[in-house]
Amino acid sequence: MRQITAGLAVLLALTGVSACATADRPDGSAVAVAATGAERLITLTRWDGSRQWNRGDLAGTTVSDGRLVFDQGVATTTADGRSYDVARWTSPWVEPGYAFTELIASWSATTPRDSWIEVKVRGRDGGGDRTSWDVIGRWTSGDQHLQRHTVSGQADDGTSVAVDTWRTSGLLGYQVRISLARRAGASYRPSLDLATAMASRLPSSAGATSEPGPARGVVLQVPRLSQMVHTGHYPRWGGGGEAWCSPTATSMVLGYYDSLPTPRRYRWVPDGHVDPWVDHAARMTYDHAYDGTGNWPFNTAYAAPLAGKAFVTRLRSVREAERFLAAGIPLVVSIAFGRGELDGAPIGSSNGHLLVLVGIRDNGNVVVNDPAADSRRRVRRTYDRGQLERLWLEASGGLAYVITDPDHPLPKPGAATNW
């Protein structure tokens, strides 16, 4: 199931990955909180709200009602032969407190009509030397004007891009730059609600299985959807079936929040297609350069305006994931496994797969909605805690899509958490 993990093929070859959190200081600036656990060094920095956006450098952008908004063009660029006005925002330098080897950015944006955003990142080493800016992706909420895409490669000065993941040889700091572009002369205003950047350095081994925690006995009623019923749908967006586990998992969480897109959004899907909102999600998350729907931040960027907030992070254990389940928040997680490594799975193996964590049995085993099942009624499964945790942590470093709505706020992070 190649599509589901945009950066997973790379992650499998690395020695480690993981995630961390931010907290808000009284002055509103973003504070990076490094998390440590079995040498899992992880830092998520978040810009969310007026005070945090104003901590960055505004160039043609303004902050209004907590959003970063296009105000006036400060540069021009071209895409597909068309001219665009560009405004920018550049974050302050962020230093997680260790030499990180990966970074994943995510965002929530609105891009009306012929507008889009571009996300870049650059780093700084211990001597103060800076890398060049690398493009993480060009993204738009539609696909009528620009094809959203990433730019893999860009291998220079010790850094490179693997679809949605920025890899480094070990840097101490980074900056994020977001460009907002709109058709030259237009008056509509693309904007951002949220941006995050997750830096990490992790071991390759998962370590000992975590003990059951606060979600023991909790099973969230997340609707069950099968990716396999879409086999053969829309080859230009991956072809359904094995290629659509990520948009199917994302759609399950949106359905849980009663936040699926309205029927007019997927009216282009022919009558008779089961769960047409999955076809729509696949189209709206498709990465035209990667040639798949498994780009991690493209999925959370699709989900965020529908539900409320969404971002990509990494967690350190199933026990840490239980804090979200106890708060009523299901998680989309990325795993990989070989034959015989995941008892009860609907498929024999996968080099990358996304499913939804929905609960914990009384004995600590993990309840999931696995979209690889061949029908809705077979989607709900229970997996051995130790097996699933190892496959999750060692394949993707504990990567998760965190999608929330206003009725389900994030659990309180505490002193050192990943959100």
Image: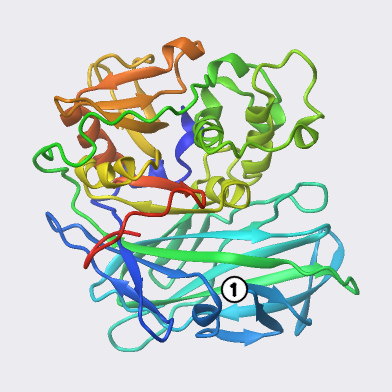
In this orientation, does residue 353 appear? no
**Which residue is most to the front?**
407
Q: Residue at x 82, y 52 (%)?
A: 145
Residue sitting nearer the eye, 217 or 225: 217
- Looking at the rendering, which quadrant does residue 118 occupy? bottom right
- Looking at the rendering, which quadrant does residue 330 occupy? top left
Image location of residue 41, percent across then percent down = 22, 62
**Is residue 38 rendered to the left or right of residue 377?**
left
Q: Is residue 298 above or below residue 110?
A: above
Under tag 1, what secondary structure? loop
- Looking at the rendering, which quadrant does residue 178 occupy? bottom right
Q: Is residue 237 above or below residue 347?
A: below
Tag 1: amino acid: Gly
In this orientation, does residue 172 appear? yes
**Is residue 272 rendered to the left or right of residue 393?**
right
Q: Residue at x 50, y 25 (%)?
A: 223
**Is residue 256 rendered to the left or right of residue 334?**
right
- Looking at the picture, the colour scheme in use is rainbow
Q: Quadrant of the C terminus?
A: bottom left
Image location of residue 405, percent across then percent down = 51, 49
Residue sitting nearer the eye, 131 or 284: 284
How many numbered callouts? 1
Disc 1 target residue: 66
**Is residue 10 rendered to the left or right of residue 117?**
left
Q: Residue at x 70, y 51 (%)?
A: 141
